[in-house]
Image: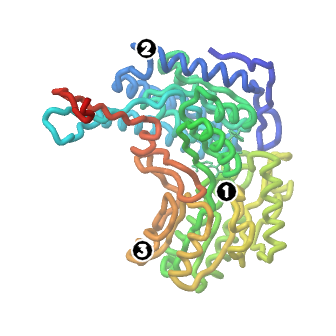
Amino acid sequence: MWRAAAAGGTREVLDPADASTLRVVSEGGAEDVDAAVAAARRAFGGGAGAWPTTPVAERAALLRRVAELLQRDREEIALVESRDTGKTLEEGRVDVDDVTNAFRYFADAVSNDSGGRVVDAGSAEVHSVVVHEPVGVCALVTPWNYPLLQASWKIAPALAAGNTFVVKPSEITPLSTVHLVRLLAEAGLPDGVANLVTGAGVPVGQRLAEHPDVDLFSFTGGLASGTTAGAAAVKGAKKIALELGGKNPNVVFADACASAEGFDTAVDQALNAAFIHSGQVCSAGARLIVEASVSERFVAELARRAERIRLGRGTEEGVECGPLVSRQQLEKVEAYVASALAEGARLRCGGSRPEPADVRPAGGYFYAPTVLDGCHREMKVVREETFGPILTVETFASEEEAVALANDTEYGLAGAVWSADTARARRVAARLRHGTVWINDYHPYLPQAEWGGFGKSGIGRELGPTGLDEYRESKHIYENLRPEPVKWFAG
Ligand code: NAD
């Protein structure tokens, strides 16, 4: 059942390509969160036949139906995601396919691992088993850069494990999550299992973090809001999962560039690592760390190609990068570039909004892909997550120095190493303190492999077997088959 916000509030969702209004949605508040959590609690405690006790095979079948519906609506959802976030239509399609795979993966994962395990208690007269149970009511808070994907990485395992939930998408990009929740209902999910509240981080996300009847709080977003919300959730002793930011190194050794083909590939992938979705990617390869002997040639080619990236509305044919998601994000990027230049960085390309004649439509939040050379670890632009189309370049002279630079971040989400020397590539990968490390590649991830970060990139993992376990409690049931007095106390 869909309803307006209790206080009657609404919000305009903007198209970042021209700042026009895309849709008007309800602007929820604490009262709406309370109603949604109450519905999720009722659905969780519904007794026989309720979602937590629905056989695993039926839960998995529902996830597979959702996967089919996502594919049926692929074009429609990709379009919504592209208009809402600014990303290209093709990126929107890739997101729908990835999300489809995630639903299928968690359907398989829960089917293959639902029985718990028998534990050897050291006695034939004891039967000891560890079983899985759902955690309860889950609060799921997601960001604006991959709205459908981040919501699905939480919703699919939460449902697979038998939980009920309340999801709060980013107030900037709620539309694809609304579509997904409609599909869950169409697939046959019982009433009250899936709940959605649109609205701002404060009060909606904050109320979810503090709500006494929420058992698990899973958040994806920035470090500042994530730690604030996480602290509130911990105060109530909830289980928490935080997927936060990243400042990700892309390490290129000269040997990767020895052949013309190797050079072109490493440059091309460095471009993709930094600028896809205008750099608004938690795992963006925003720090290029390149061996000094090839750096000039590498950066010159990178800047030449970055200048040619075609900006425009993500739905238009031939556009390679859309706008930034909001005016606030655009201004933040401008401030980072200004600070970098003030700290001595050299501008190799970009560094400003594009000329009005070079990008259509007018009025959008566009920023030219920017390469900054001569950077060092003390610069703000190197240390902080800019979440925009800014690539900083640092150089190294030895393997030791490359590793030290790549690990010199408070984050630890992802990173890559490029080398033609397999032993070196594996040696460096083993030393990188990041949750995902690519060798001679950048950006791919797999639903069956854990995603998450070291350091301040977060707490917990999504995807893979651990991503399912985040949504399950383990319960040890110890059964004495021949009970006798213990006689510990003499009297
Ligand atoms: P954000 O932290 O501003 O917002 C994320 C979500 O939290 C939104 O729904 C927002 O409304 C809500 N929120 C804000 N303040 C809150 C509060 N006090 N209590 C509860 N909820 C609150 O992040 P964003 O700008 O939407 O997204 C960009 C950030 O997300 C970047 O830092 C990026 O690295 C991160 N991110 C991380 C991953 C990952 O997998 N680690 C993936 C995508 C994005």
Q: Residue at x 61, y 28 (%)?
A: 212
Mark 1 sits on what residue? 279
Q: Viewer-proximal residue, 366 or 44?
A: 44
- Residue found farthest to the front: 491
How far across and down, in percent of the image, does residue 462 sit? 49, 45
Mark 3 sits on what residue? 427
Decide which of tag 1 and tag 3 comes sooner along the chain.
Answer: 1
Q: Is residue 215 above or below residue 369?
A: above
Q: Residue at x 48, y 52 (%)?
A: 445
What amino acid type is highlighted by mark number 1?
Answer: Gly
One can see residue 404 in this view: yes
Quarter of the displayed picture in which ligand 1 can be seen: top right
Q: CA distance from mark 1 to mark 3?
A: 28 Å
In what element is the residue under mark 2? loop
Mark 2 sits on what residue? 47
One can see residue 93 in this view: no
Q: Viewer-proximal residue, 163 or 154?
A: 163
